[in-house]
Image (tube, rainbow, N blue to C red):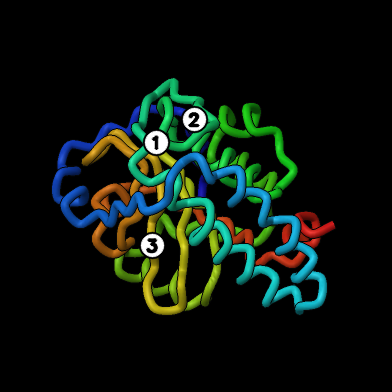
């Protein structure tokens, strides 16, 4: 299938997004002033992961981002030019949201350069464990990603990017979008209009990639 390259920090033209917003789970449960503490936990996490299998380390990495980093960002306003590095203050574009979260979780990346490149280029720079689901029906796409098991992935869409988080029971879509509320949200993937209406869907399974996790650890 022909690759489609799209800019990350871009406006997502989506008209029927209000229904997706209604289904969004926006949980802003932690004060922003402890975000530094949440980020600092990654040091001890990496030490603990060094005693685990790579598979368990990947799951721990995914859980850390979902439970410790993402909650601070939920509700942060989206903007096409948003580049804030502080959750709840300023605005954040979709690409910058992904790269900032990864950087703050201890992944050594060039936050700005990666946020401005094409989604597939970004995914390729993170992992070789990539699948293009563009030819699949929406239902098949959801089921196939869920079948991969627990973990965190980066997804590239027509004009958008974000995270997919599989907690073992539900597949969640975590992203900063103009659609719906115009904020960072965590919503059920199967109920997301943004995912449903995107023809292009490429997923990089970062937490399930042994090389990615080793680079994160060491």
Above or below for 150 versus 82: below
The tag earlier along the polypeptide, 3 or 2, is: 2
Horizontal and vertical percent for residue 149? 52, 77
**Point 32% across, 54% down: residue:** 27
Badge nearest the viewer, 3 or 1: 3
Taking depth in this image into account, of 202 and 21 the one nearest to the observer is: 21
The tag earlier along the polypeptide, 3 or 1, is: 1
Q: Secondary structure at mark 2?
A: loop
- The residue at which mark 3 appears reads as 172
Marks 3 and 2 sit apart, C-alpha to C-alpha, by 23 Å
Q: Contact (CB < 8 A) between labels 1 and 2?
A: yes
Above or below for 211 versus 11: below
Badge nearest the viewer, 3 or 2: 3
Determine crowd level at label 2: few under 14, some 14-19, many 20+ residues with C-alpha closer than 10 A: some
Marks 1 and 2 sit apart, C-alpha to C-alpha, by 7 Å
Q: Secondary structure at mark 3?
A: strand
Q: Contact (CB < 8 A) between labels 3 and 1?
A: no
- The residue at which mark 1 appears reads as 159
Horizontal and vertical percent for residue 142? 37, 68
Above or below for 52 versus 26: below
Q: Is residue 116 left or right of residue 94?
A: right
- The residue at which mark 2 appears reads as 7
Which image quarter is the C terminus in? bottom right
């Amino acid at each position: 299938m022909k690759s489609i390259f799209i800019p990350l920090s871009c406006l997502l033209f989506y008209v029927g997004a209000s229904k997706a917003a209604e289904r969004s789970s926006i949980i802003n449960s932690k004060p922003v002033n402890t975000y530094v503490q949440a980020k600092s936990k990654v040091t001890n996490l990496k030490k603990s992961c060094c005693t685990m299998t790579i598979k368990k380390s990947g799951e721990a990495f995914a859980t850390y981002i979902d439970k410790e980093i993402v909650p601070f960002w939920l509700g942060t306003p989206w903007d096409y030019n948003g580049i804030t590095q502080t959750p709840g203050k300023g605005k954040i574009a979709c690409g910058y949201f992904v790269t900032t979260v990864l950087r703050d979780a201890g992944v050594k990346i060039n936050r700005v350069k990666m946020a401005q490149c094409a989604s597939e280029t970004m995914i390729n720079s993170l992992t070789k464990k990539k699948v293009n689901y563009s030819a699949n029906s929406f239902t098949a796409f959801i089921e196939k990603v869920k079948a991969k098991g627990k973990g965190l992935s980066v997804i590239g869409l027509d004009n958008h990017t974000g995270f997919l988080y599989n907690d073992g029971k539900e597949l969640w879509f975590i992203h900063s979008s103009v659609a719906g509320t115009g904020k960072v949200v965590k919503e059920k993937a199967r109920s997301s209009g943004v995912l449903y209406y995107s023809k292009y869907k490429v997923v990089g399974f970062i937490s399930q990639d042994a090389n990615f996790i080793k680079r994160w650890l060491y």
